[in-house]
Image: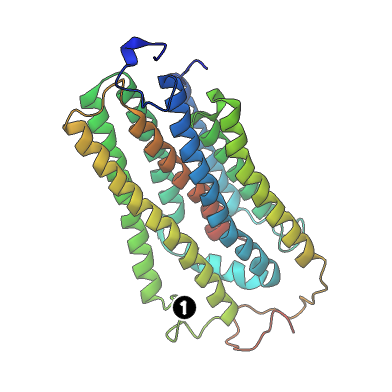
Amino acid sequence: MQHRDESLKTCYIVYALLIVLLVLTVIAARVDFSQHGFDYLNLNIVIALVIAVLKAVLVMLFFMHVRLSSRLTWVFASTAFFFLALLLAFTVADYSARPMDRTIAPPDAPVVANFDHP
Amino acid sequence: MPDHPEHLGLVAHQFDDIEQQREAATLGMWAFLATEVLFFGGLIVAYAVYRHEYFLSWRKGSEELDKFTFLNISAGAWNTLVLLTSSLTVVLSVHAAKHGKNALLLRMLLATMVLGAAFLGIKFLEYSNDYREHLIPGPNFSPEVSNHVQLFFVMYFAMTGLHALHMVIGLGLFTWLAVQTLRRKITPDRHQAVETIGLYWHFVDLVWIFLFPLLYLVR
């Protein structure tokens, strides 16, 4: 397989995109969207995580040269994320299916007892 | 006999040619990084489960972290900026190494190390602030907030601590690269070390890209 290279211009553009995404995520975090979506998976955290995934994809494809790498490298790079996705999906699916009472949950009360879970 | 006689002596005897050798080195690093994904991934899953259970306490913990700012921007955001920039200097180091620009390579390696040290410096200021504010889990943890906020800080120190350890290892590897560059051991034909260690550095950056929203931007 011929070894190819990302041009420096591409790398500067990717860096600029990464900084734009960083500024976006910092600004988005200052707006309170927590009324939208589930309480523990509200719009704020969804926006923050989507931007994180975009940044990670940019770093992997361009800075880590995955875009121009062999298919075997693609397999190696995606396998780990595939198994992480399995671990995360099944664990979260299990926990989110459990009944919970979140009516009493004062996080700043000086309590030792388990008050998130009355 | 290798296909390209000009690469004789550069290719270890178990490889057909220099491309295969390069591919093997890249795959080896990716195999290691795959184990690292699951290493940090385990912590992130633990984080997700506890956040699901105690999400209000998680929000409170994140708000405490957000109080430590420079110019009204959290230390975590500054550190993201520092690490993204260091990834760019790593890309420039690899480029310089490939084209035999040794002076530029050395400058970019040093720039990466300065940025890495800046990251750890900001982290140190943040940890000392946590100490002053009684946010380090243990008997002296702030009585103002609940035990579940303390659990958030357990996750915070475990995740950022493990990440900081990776940064320290990365700084060590870059010091070695800088020494090799000074000894003129890095040439366009022999620059694989810069690429492989660069992959590791980008991965450490990748981990921080996820830790930053998970720890600092939780609402």
- Give the amino acid at mark 1: Pro
- Residue A34 lies, in percent from the top left, at 70, 59
The structure residue drawn at horizontal position 48% and vertical position 50%, both measured from the top left corner, is B208
Q: Nearer the viewer, residue B10 or A57?
A: B10
The structure residue drawn at horizontal position 78% and vertical position 64%, both measured from the top left corner, is A94
Answer above or below: position of B140 versus B79: below
Q: Nearer the viewer, residue A111 or B158?
A: B158
The structure residue drawn at horizontal position 53% and vertical position 67%, both measured from the top left corner, is B155
Q: Residues within 10 Å of mark 1 (few under 14, many from 20)?
A: some
- Residue B28 lies, in percent from the top left, at 47, 38
The reply, left or right, for residue B215 in relation to residue A99 is left
Answer above or below: position of B100 versus A23: above
Which quadrant holds residue A82? Answer: top right
The reply, left or right, for residue B111 in relation to residue A82 is left
Q: Nearer the viewer, residue A64 or B143?
A: A64
Q: Which residue is mark 1?
A: B137
- Residue B33 lies, in percent from the top left, at 50, 45
The structure residue drawn at horizontal position 70% and vertical position 66%, both measured from the top left corner, is B52
Which quadrant holds residue B162? Answer: bottom left
